Amino acid sequence: MSYEKHKANWMNEYPAIIDLAKKAKKRIPHVAWEYLQSGTGEEDLVQRNREAFQKITFLPQFCQGALAPTLATTLFGQKYAAPFGIAPVGLTGLMWPSVEHYLAATANRYQIPYTLSTVATETPETVGPQVGNMGWFQLYPPREKALRQSLLKRAKDAGFHTLLVTADVPMPSRRERTKRAGLRMPPQITPRMIWEGITHPAWTIATLRNGLPRLRTVEKYASHSNMKFVSNMVGNRLGGTLSWEYCQILKEEWDGPVVLKGVLHPKDAEKAVEIGLDGIIVSNHGGRQFNGAVTSIEALPAIVDAVGGKTKILFDSGIRTGLDIMRALSLGADFVLLGRGFVYGVAALGKYGGDHVAEILKDDLTNNMVQLGVENVRQLSGL
Ligand SMILES: Cc1cc2nc3c(=O)[nH]c(=O)nc-3n(C[C@H](O)[C@H](O)[C@H](O)COP(=O)(O)O)c2cc1C
């Protein structure tokens, strides 16, 4: 196993996700880093997501003899080896070509879910074989029925079994940071781009091999494969119209669990339960959509009070450590996802970078469970 070859060194050189982020920043062009890190507005929500985690503390209990935590978790009737998975990330190939394939293979090896975004740079057809039975698909809800049904069919045929529909993008947000960094669709060859290419040779070689990042899943629906037409098509035909009726239609059309991503208000959580969705994801999109929103970890307890036990509660936004996972589970989340964390891994270390992130998280979560004095993740939610 190639990861095994690197494991001891990587555990010493990059013992935490923050170390991977530092390395990723050096290895990828400025514009890719800024896109990955970006929030919206003054970006304090990205910061607040982290700070809110750091305020959550525990009262450990000792003298319980040897503890051997188990991380295995069942969600929607399927067993996962750990209570965390990989969140959907769009325009992924900008950060590193083939991220989707690498992370899908990581998910398969580690038996954790991988979510493919509608606006990823690789397709369900090529990612499906890598991900095995760990595939989830994220939908930006198309306005047209035919387009929706085509995307759902392609995802299903490729083996993706759990559907995430994203609620928290009622319109694209203003990402000032990515504008300042010069992100344009289609990418323009400017002197700065050329310089970035020269100064990040590993990224440039991988990109030349793979081709410039394209929205490969949705480009076939655009009138022209030029990126400008494809991004216009995404703006005009995907998203902006999600309603409860639409969610109900998805529940009828998708044979498998349907999960609403981006819930912060307990009333939205209650409504999702009322219409029979299988789960919700308490999330503020990693701070990328609405800078005025509450942090997702602060929103979690009221949602657990409102719908805990009636639906599955997933969580994301701001998780960087195993301890953060423990914090979210202790407040009542059933499962968590990470977006940036896994991308840092591949951008820093390449093909097996996602394996290293999974190892860090498993190790850190296990260690913190022992420090706290619990042996399984179910015990955490009773704290
Ligand atoms: C670069 C980037 C692109 C993203 N693209 C999508 C997307 O296409 N669809 C979606 O539902 N969420 C998207 N998200 C949000 C993530 O799924 C997830 O909610 C968020 O990253 C969680 O926060 P974290 O990065 O702090 O873990 C994206 C996040 C990032 C950082």
Image: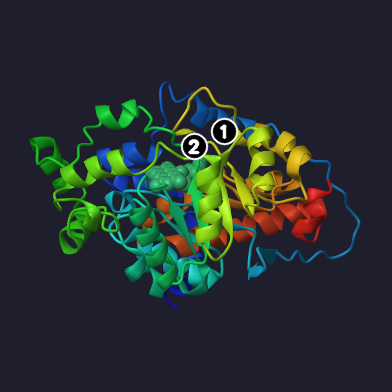
Mark 1 and mark 2 lie on one chain; the one further toward the N terminus is: 1
Q: Which residue is mark 2?
A: 168
Q: Amino acid at mark 2?
A: Asp
Q: Residue at x 35, y 27 (%)?
A: 174
Check mark 2 vs ligand 1: CB closer than 8 Å? yes or no.
yes
Mark carried by residue 98: none
Left or right: 133 as drawn, with respect to 327: left
> How far across and how far down the image is residue 250, in percent?
51, 54
Left or right: 83 as drawn, with respect to 236: right
Check mark 1 vs ligand 1: CB closer than 8 Å? yes or no.
yes
Q: Residue at x 77, y 61 (%)?
A: 376
Q: CA distance from mark 1 to mark 2?
A: 16 Å
Q: Which residue is mark 1?
A: 49
Name the quarter showing ligand 1: top left
Residue 331 visible in image: no
Give the mark toward the camera: 1 or 2.
Answer: 2
> How far across and how far down the image is residue 273, in percent?
68, 47
Q: 377 or 60, which is in the foreground? A: 377
Residue 69 visible in image: yes
Task: Judge whether 322 appears above or below 9 on screen.
Answer: above
Outermost residue on the bottom side: it is 1
